[in-house]
Image: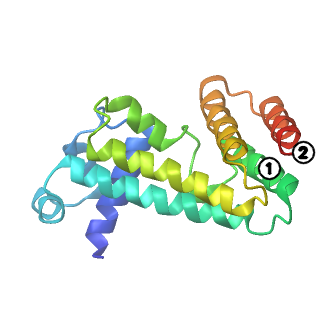
Amino acid sequence: MSKKRQLLIDTALTLFYNHGIHAIGVNEILKRSGVAKRTLYSHFNSKEELLLAALEARHRLFIQWLESKLSNAKNDLEVTTVLFQALENWFDNNEPRLGEFRGCFFINTCGEYSDVSCEIRKLCEQHKSKVRQVIADKLSIDNQDNVAALCILMEGAIVTAQVSGKNTLLIEDCINASQAMLR
């Protein structure tokens, strides 16, 4: 991948995540990246194509982060503890790989795109499905209802932390609820 293409994706991702997609225009991305408009359009036919590339980049980053966090968990109770402690670190801006916490980029993106059949929403749905699969693969239980409930707790924690900023009690509650569910 060319350096300028990557710079455009990184810049767009940062701006979209920090300010929202519809609030950021192509000119702002060009200004911040220092890349010429002609170069942008040689790599992307539209702002939506650039957004899709930014979503894919965030997806890869988040999945790698999640897999690395869960990699050493030895049992289901450790998986839930590690998962929610990692989320707490992210909420508290202690996960440099993920950047400053602004909620879930995929949830935020869905909030800006109402057409559930558009490619952007489909990519967001695929991301959530992959997150669920990563968590399911780490659990010894083969109960999809429990996996779904654990993922709902995780998504609820992300949204609650974004809206309220109350992380510590939230995380303790999530750990307790998820561990009770898995027993």
Residue 40's disc number: none
In this figure, which residue is indicated by the disc labeled 1? 80
x and y percentages locating residue 23 in the rendered image: 30, 32
Q: In this view, does 70 lie to the left or right of 62?
A: right
Residue 183's disc number: 2
Q: What residue type is labelled 2?
A: Arg
Q: Report the front residue among 35 and 149.
A: 149
Give whichever of discs 1 and 2 has the lower sequence position: 1
Q: Residue at x 14, y 64 (%)?
A: 39
Q: Which residue is drawn at 43% across and 45% down?
A: 125
x and y percentages locating residue 129 in the rendered image: 51, 51
Q: In this view, does 131 lie to the left or right of 108?
A: right
Task: Give the mark count.
Answer: 2
x and y percentages locating residue 73 in the rendered image: 82, 64
* Residue 32 in view here: no
Q: How crowded is the residue under tag 1: few (<14 C-alpha within 10 Å), some, or many (20+)?
A: many
In this rendering, the answer to whether 82 lies above or below 149 is below
